[in-house]
Image (cartoon, helix red, strand yellow):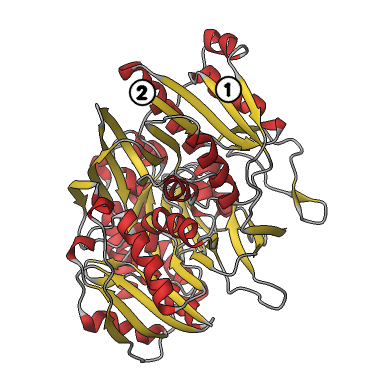
Amino acid sequence: MSVLVFIELEEGKIKKSSREAISFAAAMGDTVAVALGTADADELASAGNNGASKVLHVADDRLNAGLIQPYAEVLAAAANESGAETIVTAKSSLADAVVGRVAAKLGAGLVSNVVGLPDTSNGFVVKRSIYTGKAFANTSITTDKKILAIKKNAIEVKTDGGSAAVEAFSVSLDDALFGAKITSTDKAEGDVLLPEADIVVSGGRGLKGPENWGMIEDLAKTLGAATGCSKPVSDMDWRPHHEHVGQTGVKVSPTLYVAVGISGAIQHLAGVNSSKYIVVINKDEEAPFFKAADYGIVGDAFEVVPKLNEALKKALA
Amino acid sequence: MNILVCITHVPDTTSRIAFTNDNTEFDKNGVQFIIGPYDDYALARAVELKEQHGGKITVLNVGEAESDPTIRKALAIGADEAVRVNAFPSDSFFVANQIAAVAKQGEYDLILMGRESIDFNGGMVHGMVGELLGLPSFSPVMQLDVDGSTAKITREIEGGKEKLEVNLPFVAGCQEPIAEWKIPNMRGIMSARTKPLNVVEPTDATVHSELSKYELPPAKGAVKMIDADNVEELVDLLKNEAKVI
């Protein structure tokens, strides 16, 4: 069986979550990946290190931006070209927007937030995370063609030192597919992406104001972490919305989540409940977040965080 | 302007999630149902756009009769009429197909919905509807302004945002801060009782997936408390017990 993987690039590099998707697909069968837009051939060949045998490269510079309709067209064409019965992608805001269209184009059954390999002993059953991480559903896909969107940080990246053959792949894309014009992009460069991060340091209202975020950023820097925040913090514009972690913001699933000055409303917990370990620092010992934490410190963030940062620097030096 | 807003009928975000009937059904016991929070943002923006440009808002739900109070709430918030496709929304393609069938019967300038439902969190229906109707689709949309036959939208990308100019009509999966949630006032609640809520039967029964069994995650162990004067202990635990740094 052959599997097609949608590779997302970030600043010219294959995203970690795409490498997770390739590792997942390679465990299912022969894996062909597809990459869109300008990309470095060596970088694409490195998909082989995670188990891809081939990368179809659509080097059309109109695809450098993540445009939904042309991307869907390319994915469907690549699925036909490779003869893949299953398409695998990391779940992301772009992939969500794209693969729904691909599913409708191909008549493929689509399941999102997949957390493990399919059980094919009796049909094709996949386990997916539902209710914002509060439960799982085993779902049977009943169509011949299938699309799986894999939850981030749910699958381990495998490396075997392999290299994939990179092949140019051309898809004729009608101008009508490019009707949407991107007029500006506002994106922090060089930062660890919050949805992809292994470690996340988040701050809440307990930090009292945006001017105090320096210590959160310092701690994040020491840990190589991404920074996040609670909903009130993004609602008050202390921090940008793409840092909002929670039910209606980004759902993260890092190995370590550090929450500073966040009380732990159930809507915030919904965004972090897939984290492997949770550290909570809060001056209120009754903060509900402690019940969901692995490690807790009751104390003033303005004293604890700088001390913790120094101790971590020493330990990681 | 003619706007179709698709809403889900989902458990309140504070609900305890449990299952019944040998883990094959969601346990509704004691659970309050609400308009999906993302759909609620879409509805709120639709109401604002109607205030600016005039027009009509139709709210659509694919669900069983238990959705009706949720649909009435959307009418109270400001939708003019409602359609309920009378079926259990078990599969994203099935739902998208019903939405597309209803959308084809009206001339909608905008088809808005949440970026995802908060029960299954798939986030796939907006794209499917766009494809089924041959319309562009965008998600997650955090800003939406209409000017004649074009719109300026802002979508969130990982680590930032992007502004786009697009032509109407299109499908959008919405999220905050596209608008503030609206709380229905008494006049809205009264008028919602008499606004039309048309129940129609599904047009196409095709499903692409079936749910078999639910599971709950294992319970979390107890928290280990560390003294604020001994942050070194936390560092040691993270390094040697959790092995995450």
Amino acid identity at mark 1: Lys
Along the line of sight, which residue is nearer the eye, A284 or A268?
A: A268
Given residues A31 and B129, the one toward you in this image is: B129
Chain designation of label 2: B
Question: CB atoms at circles 2 and 1 under 8 Å apart?
Answer: no
Q: Nearer the viewer, residue B184 or B168?
A: B168
Of B222 and B33, the residue lying toward us = B33
The answer to whether residue B116 is seen in the rendering is yes
Q: Position of residue B42 (x, y in %)?
A: 43, 33
- Residue at image position (28%, 80%) is A44
The residue tagged 2 is: B1
Label 2 sits on what residue type?
Met
Q: Residues within 10 Å of mark 2 (few under 14, many from 20)?
A: some
Instruction: From this view, report whether residue A188 is shown above or below residue A207.
Output: below
Kind of element beneath mark 1 = helix
Residue name at image x 53 percent, y 7 percent: B187
Q: To which quarter of the image does residue A115 belong? A: bottom right
Question: Picture coordinates of residue A240 (x, y %)?
Answer: 29, 43
Q: Which mark is residue B73?
A: 1
The residue at 43%/55% (across/down) is A101
Q: Quadrant of residue A126?
A: bottom right
Query: In the rendered picture of this protein, how many numbered marks are placed on residues?
Result: 2
Chain name for mark 1 = B
**Disc 2 to disc 1, how far (Cα)?**
22 Å
The C terminus of chain B sits in image quarter: bottom left
Q: Residue at x 33, y 61 (%)?
A: A71
In this view, A271 is above or below B145: below
